[in-house]
Image (cartoon, rainbow, N blue to C red):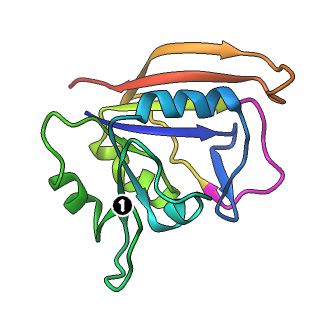
Amino acid sequence: MISIIVCIAKNHAIGHENKLLYWLPNDLKRFKQLTTGHTIIMGRRTFESFPKGALPNRRNVVLSRQTDIHFEGAEHFPTLEEALASCRPDEDIFIIGGATVYEQAMPLSDRLLITHVEDTPKQADAFFPIIDTALWKEVNREEHGTDEKHNYPYAFVDYERVKE
């Protein structure tokens, strides 16, 4: 099972200057709960954005065409296809960014686990692809309002690929 997990704004923005746009504790808890014990695949810049390096209790896989580079606590592959080929058939795989990796993974993924934030940021330089409703159907939605830790309303929305 290949899942994409991401937090996106109304305009599909996901980041600015290699940083997340939103700090939503419940989104971070959900991310940790869903990905712990599984494989996470990301681009080099996403890995480099982690303040403490590789995420614990997960198989960290970094995509980079650079051959002379080492990612502490992570495996390295030049392409998404090679990274996926290294995974077992029964492995749960989560694609965690960035924008280019999401774009490459969309046609290969089984589900999308998206946090939709009801906001359009003033600045963004990374965007998630448009979700084609002919290819993806919403199967679960959990709405949340603002509170002392969450400045914007948001929803956890799960999509599954439409079976042909």
Where, by quadrant of the figure, is residue 16 drawn? bottom right
Image quarter (top left, top right, bottom left or bottom right) of the N terminus: top left
State the residue position of label 1. Answer: 74
Residue in front for this viewpoint, 33 or 137: 33
Q: Give, as a single range, the part of the protein colored magenta.
A: 117-126
Question: Magenta span has 122?
Answer: yes
> Mainly helix, strand or loop, the magenta region?
loop
Residue at 77%, 23% in the rendered image: 153
The answer to whether residue 25 is above or below residue 44 is above
- Dot 1 amino acid type: Ala
Residue 93 rendering spot, x and y as whole percentages: 30, 40
Rendering quarter of residue 154: top right
Q: Residue at x 22, y 52 (%)?
A: 84
Closer to the camera, 125 or 151? Answer: 151
Residue found 51% across the figure and 47% down from its top? 129
x, y percent for residue 152:
80, 29
Does the magenta segment cover residue 144?
no
Q: Position of residue 79 (x, y in %)?
A: 28, 66
Of residues 87 and 17, the one drawn nearer to the viewer in this rendering? 87
Toward which corner of the image does residue 112 lie, by quadrant?
Answer: top left
The quadrant of the image that shows the C terminus is top left
Q: Count how many numbered circles sit on residues in the image.
A: 1
Outermost left residue: 89
Badge 1, how many Cα within 10 Å: few under 14, some, many 20+? some
Residue at the extreme bottom: 68
Vertical relation: 63 (above or below) 109: below
In the displayed structure image, the side of residue 18 where residue 55 appears, left or right: left
Describe the element under mark 1 as helix, strand or loop: strand
Residue plotted at (63% across, 44% down): 12
Specify whether 110 is left or right of 82: right
Left or right: residue 137 compared with residue 77? right
